[in-house]
Image (cartoon, coloured by chain):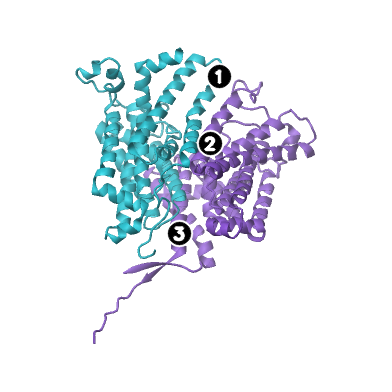
Chain colours: A cyan, B purple
Amino acid sequence: MDILQILLSESFWAASLRIATPLIFGVLGALICEKSGVLNLGIEGIFVAGAMTGWLAVWLGAGLWGGVLVAALAGGFFGLIHAVLTVPLGLSQHVSGLGVTLFATSVSYFSYRTALPTVTSPPRIEPFRPLDMPFLSDLPFFGPVLFQQTALTWLALFMVGLVWYVLNRTALGIAIKAVGDNPNSIDAQGLSVYALRTGAVVAGSALMALGGAFLTMSAFDAFFFGMVNGRGWVCIALVIFASWRPGKALLGALLFGAFDALQVRLQTEVGALVPSQVFLAAPYVLSIFALVIAARSADYPRALLTPWFKGQR
Amino acid sequence: MIRIEPRQSSSALMTYGIPVLSAIISLLLASIPLTFSGAPIGASYFEMFKGVFGSKFAFSEMLTRATPLIFTGLAVALAFRARLWNIGAEGQLYLGAMAAVAVGTGVFDVPGVILIPMIMVMGCVAGATGMAVPTLLKTKFGADEVVTTLLLNFIILIFLQYMLEGPFKDPMGLGWPQSSPILDQGMLPPLMDRMRIHSGLIIALICAITAQFMLARSVWGLKLRAIGENPSAARHAGIRVNRTLMSAAIISGALAGMAGVSEVAGLKGYLTSDLSPGFGYTGIVVAMLAGLSPLGVVAAAIFIASVFVGADSMSRAMGVSSYLADLVVSTSLLCVLVGGFVARFKFVRLIQKKEVTQ
């Protein structure tokens, strides 16, 4: 009965979409990288970098969209490091990605501490406000759930469509998918494997950083240490769950968001009976389950993790 | 035109030179963030050096810091050798620490000669379980161990918070979420008077030497290296890949668990949720700097520990954020990766000869 009430409430679905937003950015970003054949474990650190740089830019007076741009550029920069190490140099994608995560995280934390050496409580910015759309926002149910979200949530939903369109309906997308499946075919066509993969990793990383930016510029209004808290790793699991399809990625992120929103509400209902940590751990446990279920049937890009060198077959 | 060709074998100079060079470059690169924070560079480096080599106490602190890093570095190095991506050393460390607390805080009030081995065995078993589960998920279901071990880190940390607020909670802890202390006879003996350095370091060194021997000289080590170099060839050669992977997972997890045991029963005496400032993740850097060689892990752990301890005391003296240490550590990982590339390939200058037509 209680669960039914929760599931029917507008606030629950609005919260689900809100929680899903950073994951949508992250899953799409990871998906683009992996479609081109490069696993990007830099994602966790790129989230941190996006969250910190976007927030810092706004705090320094760049304006909200200026902050979004700065976050995307920061993400692209760390993506470029990963791309250089893994594409032309062909180094271990696992280790390079973890290195980028450690590097991006420590650069962000160090910069934050250096820019703000002596603050006790994190300074706040004026974050993105929920959009107020004439007529649409007043619709019953759909109004609050869909049409009172912030612009970044809309951007995330738009990106799902855009990534799907680019990957499936444009020559560029077909080339990206081909370079992740069979790089030799791309080379035979006279296209550059290096350029395609590097471009995909940089673009994907810029998208990941927007997920981080959403945290400091929409979900919250300040930057905290440890605020990303594994969201990046969850995205890596969700990509496999989504079998590298943008539509299923959206579904996976929404499911995850709904589950997370549900656990917060259940916690207030049955909090006395079950330790709160059960609810806190549930999203991570769920991700592992999703991975175990999806792993065997997952449609891996065939050249994922395999470096390619020119003139070497 | 420059062409890149793989080297047939890498020279000893490369094997030892590249990690050392990476370490030096990452330290030199630290002058960039130092400039940004406005600290005098020369004096900062001097403070860092003094923080490690300035006194007997400082040096012993560095070795104390290196102890858990040797364990986690070994855990990562052995797993990576078999291309088993154990990114979960952080979680396994906490599992080991929890096991140490479970048996060491009064349930068994037995003499130290029994209690200490009991704590160590339980810590190893707990840590090993923490790596055996994701390895099983990998071999049975094909679930990528990178993601599962990463996510398990978070699950284990949440479980730890539950244990510290509930079953493990110290009734004398004034409400802080910390465990009861390990019984006195269960503590690993200290190595020097009035210093924090403890015999966990000796155990870590024994583990490193044993691991080096096992990897280089035993049949198990041969199988492990064969799987790491070419899993399908290893399978065709009759090596039972899944079984060998599982044994690597168990040893790797047990070593990470020992890191937790050594921190709780060697250094702190009780368990809190901030026992490890990322020793598990730093273990990855240690292992990579060591070129995945167990004896190299000892040297790399000493370098990383020096960076942390030195940067700590430098940041206190100069007012620079201590995140500088993390910056140096992560830069050293990126440097050694690039160095690995330089070592594996040689750059050949192609001289284009003009073809003479007759």
Image position of B50 (left or right of B179): left
**Location of residue B179 with respect to B193 vertically, above or below:** above
Depth check, mark 3 against mark 2: the one in front is: 2
Confirm whether circles 3 and 1 share one chain. no
Residue B160 image point, x, y percent: 58, 30
Is disc 3 surrounded by few (<14), some (14 to 19) or many (20+) residues within 10 Å?
some
Residue A259 image point, x, y percent: 43, 25
Question: Quick one: label 3 or label 2, which is nearer the N terminus?
Answer: 2
Q: Would you say residue A279 is visible in this rendering?
A: yes
Image position of A154 (left or right of B265): left
Residue at the spot 44% in from the left edge and 33% down from the top edge: A225
**What separation in Å lies between label 3 and label 1 (alpha carbons)?**
51 Å
- Residue holding disc 1: A274
Confirm whether circles 3 and 2 share one chain. yes
- Residue holding disc 2: B152
Amino acid type of the residue tagged 1 in the rendering: Val
Task: Looking at this view, name the residue that lies furthest to the left.
Answer: A134
Residue at the spot 31% in from the left edge and 20% down from the top edge: A145
Identify the chain of the residue marked 3, using the numbered disc in the image: B
Residue at the spot 51% in from the left edge and 68% down from the top edge: B9
- Residue holding disc 3: B339
The one of B315 and A268 positioned closer to us in this rendering: A268
Identify the chain of the residue marked 1, using the numbered disc in the image: A
Is disc 1 surrounded by few (<14), some (14 to 19) or many (20+) residues within 10 Å?
few
Q: Which image quarter holds the C terminus of chain B?
A: bottom left
